[in-house]
Amino acid sequence: MSAESAHSLDALLEFLRQAGMEGLINPAAARARRKAVEQLMHELTEAERGDIRCIDPGTLISRFHKLEGSSIRPETLQIYAERFSAALDEYLSWLEKPSAFISPRRERARAYLRGGESEASPERAAAERIALTASENSDHIIPVPIRTNHVVWVANLPLDLSATEADRIAGVIRAYASDCAARGDAGVEPE
Amino acid sequence: MTRVFLIALMALFALVGLGLCYYLFFVEAEGPFHDSLVPELIGISIEGFMLFGLLTLIQRSREAARRKELWLSLRGSFRGLLSNLDVAFLEPDADPASSQQLEADPQAIEHLLARLETRHPDLDCLVALKREAGETLSLTRDLVAVAAQISAAHMNWWVAIVDAIRKLSESRSREQAELALHDLLVNVREFDRLEI
């Protein structure tokens, strides 16, 4: 096989077929990678088909606007991109040194069994709560934890906030404090 | 009026019309009934067949197609959530479900429910589901009026689906998120079981 044809898309597909059959790669993994390559190959340019070393999976998935005849599902496309990328790396490393090729590990399972050893410990449950709570806030909302179980969110601060403006915000917050000296029945005097 | 009743009515009009035609053309008879009334009755039979039967059937068929389109629009509106859930329970090296399965196949919901009963999605997937729920919520809420166009029962189950999506978007622990996911899937299953 010439160097050019060895780096073609057809050679990659052939490798995935043979590697699965010969046990070089787990058959299920080889089949999944081959399916991913087949899904994404339609958007490859002629140059990329001829030399798979030119392929950047990140750029490739940005060309898609539909998958399997339907509108795009980013999470599915991401899975295919990861498998495509893994297939490329494995094939290129096998080409470089077949004798040193190590069979890749299978993908990790995203879900774990209920009631098993992986069941959440209190620490893990706490970490999950933090992650889920933090996911509600976009970047422009600043969390200020004021007590162990109470977080205040400050939003919409301008990038060029001055010290005077910060003092003004602090003054408004201070007015809400139950032990604030300025707070009384008469209320806060307007500026 | 059921479809069967309509077809029976059409058959009745057709039989009466054919019988009267036979009587008019092949039976030797005289008199005002044979010469005047029978042609009138044949006309009434044809009108009945066309107006009550055929046109109503065509209208019902078009209405059913429109409702099916509405149903597909509704089901497609939270495809992203189902897709994330499908990925969350994806076995290593398995293929994700197709878009068509997620949008229209009730078996996909049963499969996801069965997986949820035996497995926990990992944290990354839960966060992705929560984010997707937040993004989907306003769209699904806007579609309550569309669900109402199908039937009152569809609207009720749709409101329940929207509420489950809201709970998921507001969940702050695994238990809350998984409970909301379970509610969502059960409500979608009930929504799918309704007759369109």
Image (cartoon, coloured by chain):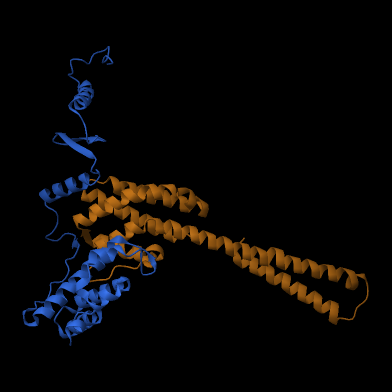
Q: Residue at x 23, y 23 (%)?
A: A172
In screen coordinates, is B176 left or right of B109?
left
In front: A74, or B93? A74
Q: Quadrant of residue A176?
A: top left
Q: Residue furthest bottom?
A: A1
In screen coordinates, is B137 left or right of A147?
right
Q: Residue furthest right?
A: B31
Chain A colour is blue
Q: Quadrant of residue A141?
A: top left
The x and y percentages for residue A115 are 16, 59
In what quadrant of the picture does the N terminus of chain B appear? bottom right
Q: Residue at x 21, y 48 (%)?
A: A132
Q: Quadrant of residue B6?
A: bottom right
Q: Residue furthest top?
A: A186
Chain B colour is orange
The x and y percentages for residue A91 are 16, 77
Q: Residue at x 86, y 81 (%)?
A: B27
Q: Is residue A116 visible?
A: yes
The x and y percentages for residue B148 are 50, 50
